[in-house]
Amino acid sequence: MNVTSTPLSLNEIRFYFTRAAVGAGAPYGIGEVFTAASMYLAFLGIDPARAAASALSSLMTGQSGASLTLRDDNNIIHIESRRPLAVSALYAAPVVADRLYIEAGYGSERRFRIHRVDQPLVVAGAVAATGIENARIVVSWTNGCGSPSRMDLNGDIATLTGMQESVEHPSGPASVDLLLTSLDSGRPLTTALTRSIVQGRSRAIQHGVEMDSLSRETIMTFFNRCLVPTSHLSRETGAGTGAEDSD
């Protein structure tokens, strides 16, 4: 990984990533969920820039779509694209987060499957960002190269298997399975890497978040797409605080 020399603060991530999503064609609210998911990947010790850049590029180039459908079949909630495209993780993330909140309130076990999502790591980050404490959530998928990835989330503690491989060796869309169940319904793998979200957030606040430099440049390219030109006309139509303002 080609790491940047200057880490980004959480406020910088919030500012740039949200607007980068807008630059890729997503509404601002979708960008906010996308940014939260990216920040929680950082709290888990995963470089958020590679996953974010991949998801943004997939949406912008039309490889993934925003039109989703939900269906309940054999007690599994399926999330699919309405078109012959991969599911955009930017749009799948808020759908999954909202539905997890609803189902967690009932207290019963539920299963989800997101078919062919372009960047599973963004979905995993969005699940971590829900902050659901009264349930255990397992997120898993298999990459196109056959390598399994898994996040087992119990409140603040996440155990991770193969997720770093998904960062370093992305292989296109994958179907993601989610299990929402009770806290005492089994234990995560003892060989998995254990992370505390609270500790990860504290590290990010104190030291910032290091990122792959090329992926960061891609995100900034999308961010730049939502900027308006500096001109008298742009100020008259809403940029800055007035026609005489030069900020």
Image (cartoon, rainbow, N blue to C red):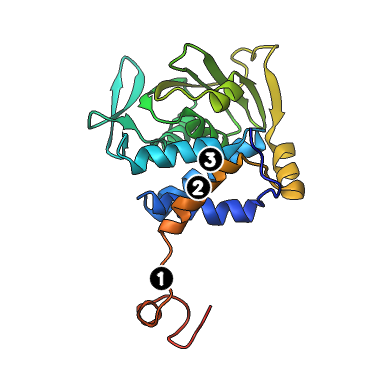
In this view, 41 is above or below 4: above
Q: Position of residue 91 (x, y in %)?
A: 38, 40
Among the 4 quarters of the image, the one containing residue 175 = top left
Mark 1 residue crowding within 10 angstroms, few (<14) / some (14–19) / many (20+): few
In this view, 25 is above or below 231: above
Q: Position of residue 28 (x, y in %)?
A: 41, 55
Q: Residue at x 35, y 80 (%)?
A: 233
Q: Amino acid at mark 3?
A: Ala
Nearer-N-terminus badge (2/3): 3
Mark 2 residue crowding within 10 angstroms, few (<14) / some (14–19) / many (20+): many
Mark 2 vs mark 3: give the one in front.
2
Residue 136 makes an appearance in the image: no
Mark 3 residue crowding within 10 angstroms, few (<14) / some (14–19) / many (20+): many
Viewer-nearest residue: 48 or 33 = 48
Q: Amino acid at mark 2?
A: Ile
Among the 4 quarters of the image, the one containing residue 136 = top right
Viewer-nearest residue: 113 or 183 = 113
Q: Which residue is mark 1?
A: 229
Q: Which residue is mark 3?
A: 37
Nearer-N-terminus badge (1/3): 3
Q: Which residue is mark 2?
A: 219
Q: Secondary structure at mark 2?
A: helix
Q: Position of residue 121 (x, y in %)?
A: 51, 30
The N terminus appears in which quarter of the rendering?
top right
Q: Secondary structure at mark 3?
A: helix
Query: What is the spatial separation of the Cα atoms under label 2 and label 3, in whole angstroms?
Result: 15 Å
Query: What is the spatial separation of the Cα atoms under label 1 and label 3, in whole angstroms?
Result: 30 Å
In this view, 150 is above or below 201: above
